[in-house]
Image: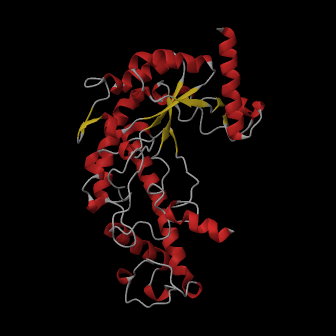
Amino acid sequence: MSNEISRRKLLERAAALASTGLTLNELRGQDERFSVGQGRRAGPSAEHGKPGLPPGPLIGTEIQYFRLDPRLWPAVLDHARTLEYRWVSSYVPWRHHQTDPGQFDFRGETAANRNLVRFIKLIAERGLLYCYRPGPFTCNEDIGGGLPDHIILNRRDISVWDSKDELAPGYQIPGKHGHQPSYMHPDYLKEVRIWLAAADEVIRPFSMTNGGPVGLIGLDNEVSYIVQDSMFGSDYNPHNLQRYRSWLRRKYGTIDKLPYRDSYRDFDAVQPPRELQSDVEPNLAWYTDWVAFKEDTFRDYLAELRSMHAENGLGDLVCFTNLNAHHPRGSCGRGPHRSTCRRQAR
């Protein structure tokens, strides 16, 4: 048994090294990019109820409680501890915990694998730390990326529109199901606020500020409209276009300063680019402004989620998001144009 444990430790550490390119000493906390403590901190000391993270390397493992038989949770967490992981990470899928719109189960009243409270208590009992990832979009090869049906089905009003005013595809794994919500649409954010208020209420007693194991919050997942973030792939939802025009107004102040080829009587009349025209260079600002606005939209969305967590009493916890380095759909690296681009490259 001891030889098997040693072998598994070696494999786990080798995998960690291979994925990061770091030395073992760096993984043990001597690289400031992945370590907290010894003068290199992600935030103020977590001691005495102050915000921040405890000293030590930020190395953990993903254990998705909702995909396991709850009877196995203790043993799986024991293995994580044996392998010297300090952190356990898991999505907390909206779709999984919602029993009806606005109604949630976090204590296993309707299904044992919904008992998030028990899972976190088991983490705490083993001296492990917890990375809490409630989305709202969690991806994870789950139906709808973890979003419930009342958000992604038959909701053209809050969905992402492409340049042809058609609904952009939703999450395609494990199968085509619904559409992606427009990040800053107020009706979508209203629903998100309900979800996070319920989930955060469960998490709050377990936060590090309150002496618990929860120290990290993941904000959404791979923010990119599910890789629909190409130039003309998103987001032409009417509400988002209102935001685009407000963004131009803040940037330029007056309509006469707008450096576009076409003239507009006011900002409300400005249309975003919907296709690549022949005279790109003389009208380059038109395209780059559209891209910059979309990048700012992603930032604003993450800031909105962070604000919701703060309002829910988790403002002292460290937040992060994971960025998926990807080719947007329709580009040379992805989708139906891939073979054409390969031929051109030859």
| Residue 127 location (% of width, % of height) | 54, 18
Q: What scheme was used to colour the molecule?
A: secondary structure
Query: Which residue occupies 58% across, 61% down?
Result: 333
Query: Which residue occupies 67% across, 68% down?
Result: 345
Query: Which residue occupies 56% across, 35% down?
Result: 52
Tell me: residue 293, above or below residue 5. below
Tell me: residue 161, above or below residue 92. below
- Asked where in the image residue 93 lies, by quadrant, the reply is top left
Q: Quadrant of the C terminus?
A: bottom right
Name the residue furthest top: 1
Q: Is residue 38 visible?
A: no
Q: Nearer the viewer, residue 100 or 144?
A: 144
Tell me: residue 113, above or below residue 252. above
Q: Is residue 175 left or right of residue 87?
A: left
| Residue 200 location (% of width, % of height) | 37, 36
| Residue 208 location (% of width, % of height) | 49, 29
* Circle count: 0
Tell me: residue 213, above or below residue 338. above
| Residue 130 location (% of width, % of height) | 50, 29
Q: Quadrant of the N terminus?
A: top right
Q: Is residue 254 visible?
A: yes
Q: Nearer the viewer, residue 158 or 32?
A: 158
- Asked where in the image residue 148 lies, by quadrant, the reply is top left
Q: Is residue 269 left or right of residue 155?
A: right
